[in-house]
Image: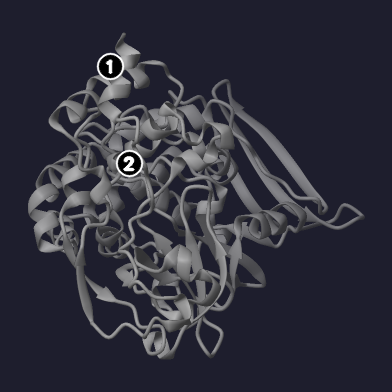
Amino acid sequence: MLGLFMAGCIGNKYTHSLQQVPPPAQSAAAIPAYTDSTITVAVGEHYGRSGLHTFFYGKHYRPAWTTPVEFRVLDLSTEKGGLSPTQQGGSRQTKNLRLETADGKEYVLRSVDKDPATALPEKWQQSYAANIIRDATSATHPYAALVLPPMAEAIGIHHTKPELVYIPHDPRLGEYLEDFGGMVALMEIRPNDDLSGEPGMGNSENIKSTRAMLKDRFFENDSHVDARYYLRARLFDMLIGDWSRHEDNWRWAQYKHDDVKVYQAVPRDRDNVFYKLNDAIIPWLFMRTGLKKHFRTYSDNLSNLDDLNRSGRNLDETILASLSYQEWMEVADSVSSALTDEVVEQSFRQMPDNIYQLTATPIMAQLKSRRDKLNKSIQKYYKSLMREAIVVGTDKHERFEIEVLSADEVRVQVTRSTKRGKSDDSYLTGCFRPPTQKRSTCTASTAMMSL
């Protein structure tokens, strides 16, 4: 009976499509270039549901999705000196379109709306369950990406700077016109290859994928990851509640430092921040199943970090084991101090004014609360990672020296060595102790891992 009632709430004829404004009634070849500079539309009008539906399935951020906002109309002929579509891509949920300037710099358009049901087998994609999954997209904030760059800049981490634009039914889209014409999308630079002219990307001449970075890290002993820098980015993830930080959501800026390649993290695709799922009966029951523990509803408390960080756990274990407890606390203090009330408030002002009025105040209060609890909250996650610390070597010749300092502490020193066993230079010294031991008689040196 409950199932039938829920089906009635969702509607048997429920359909979902990425928000698009219908094109003029003419063939694609006959559509003229769009001449208006702005257009006012709602990014997700289809998320507007009845009071009965929201009672069972949640209000989420539906007002933000259904409120019309003025957007700049993208002109492919003049934007960035002219942009040409080159390739459609994206995950199973997000549509994206790569664009290229005349000098080879790449940009990407990413749909604001998602269709997570495409991850299901095709025969299930028109089912009741698929419609529920689609409807849950309203738990994400469609304008969250706009508020993150100023905070990332204040904290001191690399970042893209997305802008929301309306993609007109422009014949220059060519074969991509049907999929992207009439869509609201985030446009940002694609973190790839040479971005020496982009301060937000650290002016790096070489941006690598996670796969390429790890290949260097595991196969060569002259490559290291700036662990403190990565920790800064990960603490920001935790503050904004980003539960989707798998390997493909990172790029890596490469630098040379004393003939050593040093990698700094470049976060991207921050689609799942300030998540607001657990605000009605049905999503509450779903969360009780434990099927998607990483779907953390944003709140005042920075808790359950093991669950929140599940998708990023592999990288965390690989990179962060070299940092001592003291270094974690130092970085956390620095991040908290940089994220002042003024920075938070100015960042949220990047939202359209009407969306700011609808949604910003409670999120800002939650973020400030999480910031104030950061040091204490991350101690549990540090202990979880250090329960079985991973010391990463490479396929090259290295010498691992393990010294037991006490019943509670071990020092590991990794030194490059030649085939004949002669030592070259030490590139990692780390102290490892049970998580309850916060003080150390030795100091973990990561000088080679930080610029």
Image quarter of residue 410 = top right
Q: Residue type at mark 1?
A: Phe
Q: Quadrant of the N terminus?
A: top left
**Residue shown at 27% from the left, 61% from the top:** 146
Query: What residue did someone put label 1 on?
Result: 5
Residue sticking out furthest to the top: 1
Q: Residue type at mark 2?
A: Gly
Residue 442 seen by the camera: no
Give the alpha-carbon distance from disc 2 to disc 1, as whole Å: 33 Å
Give the structural element (helix, strand or loop) at label 1. Answer: helix
Q: Is residue 445 above or below residue 266?
A: above
Number of on-image labels: 2
Q: Is residue 275 left or right of residue 223?
A: left
Image x and y of residue 61, in percent: 21, 43
Give the structural element (helix, strand or loop) at label 2. Answer: loop
Q: Is residue 328 above or below residue 160?
A: above
Q: Is residue 217 above or below residue 326?
A: below
Image x and y of residue 367, in percent: 20, 44
Residue sticking out furthest to the right: 420
